[in-house]
């Protein structure tokens, strides 16, 4: 067994990653402040027209809303009951959304009243040392509660395979024995790899740049619109001794009267050419196209409506990159949720099961795209042909995995007419 690094090391580790996670949460909440950048517009003017854009939130939600957990298949250890007792409609959505924003989240597993409790902790409040083989932690640290005013920790926890230590603010530390043999803090990670074992956020640096680029464009367009609405005017040849004209009257009046002087001369009134808004629209579409390509979305998703409404099949085709990202996220999250199920079952039964005993348990998700009538027809025709070639090959469970439609689970494919005649 590897030597534990200790809670002090994990505190320092969390302090290094916490600012980046909080910044992405601010990006998602549309509260991140971008310092003004520009050569021509003074900062005090730009601050009056500060733009707010929710593209990063849209990029996260477009994937999170499609990742709908269904159940654990081949549930030999009855872990579905554990999750049913922990408000699954909120738990799974919270875990998925938190992991997409912060690259990972952690599930704190505890027991109370002869039941297992599951609590999602965002990546800004927990960290640990991960085992690259199993995806479980060898030790972990989490801030279970923070002060709302000072943001300082009120209750901290240090997780080891043998016990869990709790550190209340102003109180004495205490420990509780851990019968599982695995820390009761389980990571759920989005897109992990050998370089980034704790995964990657859905809010990428490229996505943040395109959103910032679009915000700057909107700010410039908003400021330019003031001059576009009230074009600047000028008067040439005005007598210096003439009565001064009210600027507001000159701006909003539909008719101005300027008399001739004693010699019959009169000033020339003109108007400066107004700036066109078209370049800003093109810039905004350029930023939207770059962001859509980064997130696997389309311009329709970002508010640039197309002329013709798309069918379900066209939507699927245009969201191919989003579908691939969803498949990858399902595999990543499935591994983490299976680890949560494993640790929860061990804690419930008070017995350290072997991890390999859960290899047959699978994670089932609803389809990324809901099936319409045309899709159901195509799948039905395909199922009939496959079952004619290999009787019983496509079952009701297979149809549900493809369509998301929960029919009669005991239904069997109808025999072909040729087989009936025989």
Image (spheres, helix red, strand yellow):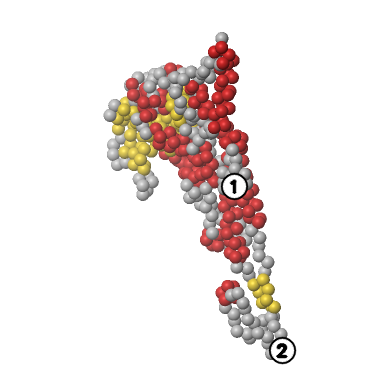
Among all residues in the image, which is located at the extreme front?
421
Query: Relative to 104, is 348 above or below?
Result: above
Residue 337 lies, in percent from the top left, at 44, 28
Q: Which residue is mark 2?
A: 263
Disc 1 on helix, strand or loop? loop
Q: Tell me the residue at 56%/44% (across/down).
A: 301
Please tell me how crowded label 2 is: few (under 14), some (14-19), or many (20+) other residues with Cα within 10 Å.
Answer: few
219 or 78, which is in the foreground?
Answer: 78
Residue 243 lies, in percent from the top left, at 60, 84
417 or 147, which is in the foreground?
Answer: 417
Q: Which residue is mark 1?
A: 305
Q: Is residue 48 visible?
A: yes
Disc 2 on helix, strand or loop? loop
Location of the C terminus by quadrant is top right
Q: Tell me the residue at 61%/35% (across/down).
A: 317
Residue 267 lies, in percent from the top left, at 69, 80
Q: Tell me the residue at 64%/82% (across/down).
A: 258
Among all residues in the image, which is located at the extreme top?
422
């Amino acid at each position: 067994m590897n030597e534990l690094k200790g809670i002090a090391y994990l505190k320092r580790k969390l302090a290094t990653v916490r600012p980046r996670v909080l910044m992405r949460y601010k990006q998602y909440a549309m509260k991140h402040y971008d310092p003004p950048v520009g050569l021509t517009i003074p900062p005090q003017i730009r601050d009056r027209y500060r733009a707010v854009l929710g593209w990063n939130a849209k990029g996260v939600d477009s994937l999170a809303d499609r990742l709908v957990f269904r159940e654990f298949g081949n549930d030999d250890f009855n872990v579905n009951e554990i999750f049913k007792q922990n408000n699954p409609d909120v738990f799974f959505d919270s875990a998925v959304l938190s992991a997409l924003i912060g690259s990972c989240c952690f599930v704190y597993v505890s027991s109370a009243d002869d039941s297992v409790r599951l609590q999602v902790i965002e990546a800004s409040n927990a960290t640990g040392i991960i085992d690259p083989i199993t995806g479980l932690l060898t030790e972990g640290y989490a801030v279970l509660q923070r002060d709302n005013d000072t943001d300082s920790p009120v209750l901290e926890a240090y997780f080891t395979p043998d016990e869990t230590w709790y550190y209340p603010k102003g109180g004495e530390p205490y420990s509780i024995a851990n019968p599982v043999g695995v820390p009761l803090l389980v990571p759920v990670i989005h897109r992990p790899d050998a370089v980034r074992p704790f995964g990657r956020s859905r809010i990428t640096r490229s996505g943040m740049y395109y959103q910032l680029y679009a915000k700057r464009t909107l700010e410039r367009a908003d400021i330019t619109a003031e001059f576009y609405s009230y074009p600047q005017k000028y008067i040439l040849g005005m007598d210096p001794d003439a009565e001064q004209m009210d600027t507001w009257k000159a701006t909003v009046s539909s008719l101005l009267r300027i008399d001739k002087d004693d010699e019959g001369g009169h000033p020339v009134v003109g108007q400066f050419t107004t700036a066109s808004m078209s370049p800003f629209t093109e810039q905004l579409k350029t930023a939207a196209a770059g962001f859509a390509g980064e997130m696997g979305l389309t311009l329709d998703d970002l508010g640039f409506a197309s002329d013709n409404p798309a069918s379900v099949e066209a939507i699927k085709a245009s969201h191919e990159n989003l579908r691939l990202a969803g498949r990858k996220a399902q595999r990543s999250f499935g591994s983490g949720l299976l680890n949560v199920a494993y640790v929860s079952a061990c804690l419930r039964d008070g017995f350290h099961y072997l991890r390999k005993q859960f290899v047959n348990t699978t994670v089932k998700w609803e389809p990324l795209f809901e099936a319409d009538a045309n899709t159901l027809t195509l799948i039905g025709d395909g199922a009939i042909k496959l079952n004619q070639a290999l009787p019983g090959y496509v079952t009701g469970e297979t149809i549900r995995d493809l369509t998301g439609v929960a029919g009669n689970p005991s239904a069997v494919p109808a025999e072909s007419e040729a087989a009936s005649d025989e």
